[in-house]
């Protein structure tokens, strides 16, 4: 048994492109997914009853089905219902839907931990409903749940490896392509795995640094 | 071309659901056993081993399950053993589950106050006795809810075994969808079956969690 990692690393351009797609998809999904999460968390904690029920159903449906099935449903199933999507769009939609559902629950937990007195104080200062939510409730809630949020974003990034199954050219797709050319399957997947590990470590650092600066103040 | 009725689709999917359940149970039980062993090693052995197991956990939590499956599939083959999708999926999912469970349980044991260890130690209980009579009864109570909750992740994780050719619910869905040209119906059914499997487990986990919190109050 001998290994030849060089045979895989020769194709570093493919790997780099794959990393680009994985990072890009994750970035877009994170930004939109967080917005979805905040909106749904608001709807679930203070929306009308029908909206609460609707969001609850969405969250439970996503959290209790595998990502790969959600992806296949969107990419293979929706065209039959008249919605045609490119693999990349389908991947983004699936990732946003997935992250959005988990983010909803995470952020809601943070919102519910807000002391009533803070909201009453804000209202007594004549802030309106939107201001109370965006300035008083949301920032400390995000701060409280940020570690859980970071973990979830990393889980979504790792889960996105499945998108290669609908021919999105991400990192796992690159590994598959390389091993289909040189038959160095084990080496190709070891390298891809190490790269994923590096991405998740890097992403955790970046988000821990970026969270306090960009999302909820210091 | 044959016409497939909804019943034909459902029947075939239900047949495949068995394998999803079987793989989930094997991975969960196997992962539980390995996870428990790792937990004991971690509590018992020195710093070096503790750190090694910590790295093991981080490796599995920081890489995609899909890559772990591929590595198991191609890695076992390198050892000169014939690998079926069954073997690879079982090995990968068992290790994956063990990493998560050992970490969950370690957290539960760590939440037991240090005084409990000291008190039982001063009563001359050995490690095994301490675990059996003092630590585990308390830790198990906290551990049930997150453990049951993780079972949902395992069930969903088995869907990835379809990628290496293991015919469970997701793979069966792809095959049936290719044969019937009804991907919308087929994948809706697949999703609903996973939901029917996972949602009760989620609810039960939440119920357990609520019970603990009531208990504490």
Image (cartoon, coloured by chain):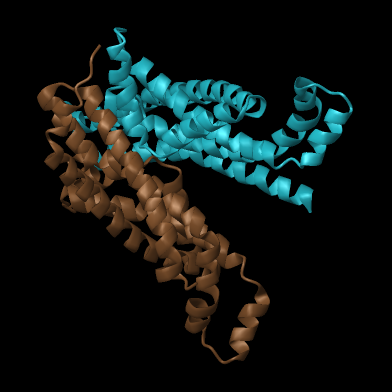
Chain colours: A brown, B cyan
* Image mark count: 0
User: Which residue is more in the foreground, A80 or B36?
Assistant: B36
Q: Is residue B102 above or below residue A61?
A: above
In the picture as drawn, the residue positioned furthest to the bottom comes out as: A126
Name which quarter of the figure residue B165 lies in: top left
In the picture as drawn, the residue positioned furthest to the left comes out as: A181
Q: Residue drawn 36% across and 60% down?
A: A33
User: Which residue is more in the foreground, B140 or A66?
Assistant: B140
Whether residue A7 is visible, yes or no, is: yes
Q: Position of residue B62 (x, y in %)?
A: 40, 40
Q: Residue drawn 62% across and 27% down?
A: B46
Image quadrant holding the N terminus of chain A, namely: top left
Q: Is residue A64 above or below residue A99?
A: above
Name which quarter of the figure residue B134 lies in: top right
Whether residue A168 is visible, yes or no, is: no
Q: Residue drawn 50% across and 37% down?
A: B152
Q: Position of residue B215 (x, y in %)?
A: 78, 47
Q: Is residue A82 left or right of residue B42?
A: left
Q: Position of residue A54 (x, y in %)?
A: 45, 60
In the picture as drawn, the residue positioned furthest to the right comes out as: B123
User: Which residue is more in the foreground, B48 or A66?
Assistant: B48
Q: Is residue A27 left or right of residue B125?
A: left
Q: Residue drawn 52% across and 29% down?
A: B53
Q: Is residue A139 above or below residue B110?
A: below
Q: Is residue A81 left or right of residue A45?
A: left
Q: Position of residue A77 (x, y in %)?
A: 24, 44
């Amino acid at each position: 048994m001998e290994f030849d990692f060089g045979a895989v690393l020769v194709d570093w351009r493919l790997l780099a492109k794959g990393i680009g797609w994985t990072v890009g998809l994750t970035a877009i999904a994170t930004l939109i997914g967080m917005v979805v999460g905040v909106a749904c968390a608001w709807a679930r904690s203070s929306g009308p009853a029908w909206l609460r029920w609707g969001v609850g159903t969405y969250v439970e449906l996503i959290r209790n089905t595998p990502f790969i099935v959600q992806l296949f449903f969107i990419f293979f199933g929706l065209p039959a219902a008249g919605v045609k999507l490119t693999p990349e769009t389908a991947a983004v939609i699936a990732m946003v839907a997935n992250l959005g559902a988990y983010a909803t629950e995470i952020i809601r937990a943070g919102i519910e931990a807000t002391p009533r007195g803070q909201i009453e104080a804000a209202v007594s200062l004549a802030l309106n409903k939107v201001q109370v939510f965006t300035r008083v409730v949301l920032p400390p809630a995000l701060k409280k749940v940020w570690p859980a949020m970071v973990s979830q974003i990393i889980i979504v990034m790792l889960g996105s490896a499945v998108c290669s199954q609908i021919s999105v050219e991400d990192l796992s797709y690159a590994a598959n392509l390389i091993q289909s050319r040189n038959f160095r399957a084990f080496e190709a997947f070891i390298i891809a795995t190490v790269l994923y590990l590096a991405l998740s470590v890097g992403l955790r650092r970046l988000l821990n640094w970026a969270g306090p600066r960009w999302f909820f103040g210091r | 071309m044959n016409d497939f009725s909804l019943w034909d689709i459902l029947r075939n999917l239900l047949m495949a659901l068995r394998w999803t359940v079987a793989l989930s149970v094997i991975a969960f039980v196997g992962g539980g056993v390995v996870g428990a062993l790792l937990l004991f090693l971690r509590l018992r052995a020195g710093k070096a081993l503790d750190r090694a197991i910590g790295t093991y956990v981080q490796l599995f939590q920081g890489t995609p399950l899909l890559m772990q499956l591929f590595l198991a599939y191609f890695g076992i083959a390198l050892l000169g053993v014939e690998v079926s999708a069954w073997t690879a999926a079982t090995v990968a999912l068992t290790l994956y589950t063990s990493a998560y469970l050992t970490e969950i349980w370690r957290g539960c044991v760590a939440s037991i106050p240090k005084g409990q260890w000291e008190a039982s130690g001063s009563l001359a209980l050995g490690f095994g006795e301490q675990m059996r009579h003092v630590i585990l009864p308390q830790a198990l109570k906290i551990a049930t809810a997150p453990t049951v909750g993780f079972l949902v992740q395992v069930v969903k994780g088995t869907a990835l075994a379809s990628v290496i050719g293991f015919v469970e619910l997701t793979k069966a869905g792809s095959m049936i969808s290719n044969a019937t040209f009804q991907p919308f119906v087929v994948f809706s059914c697949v999703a609903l079956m996973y939901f029917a499997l996972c949602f009760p487990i989620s609810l039960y986990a939440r119920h357990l969690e609520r019970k603990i919190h009531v208990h504490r109050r």
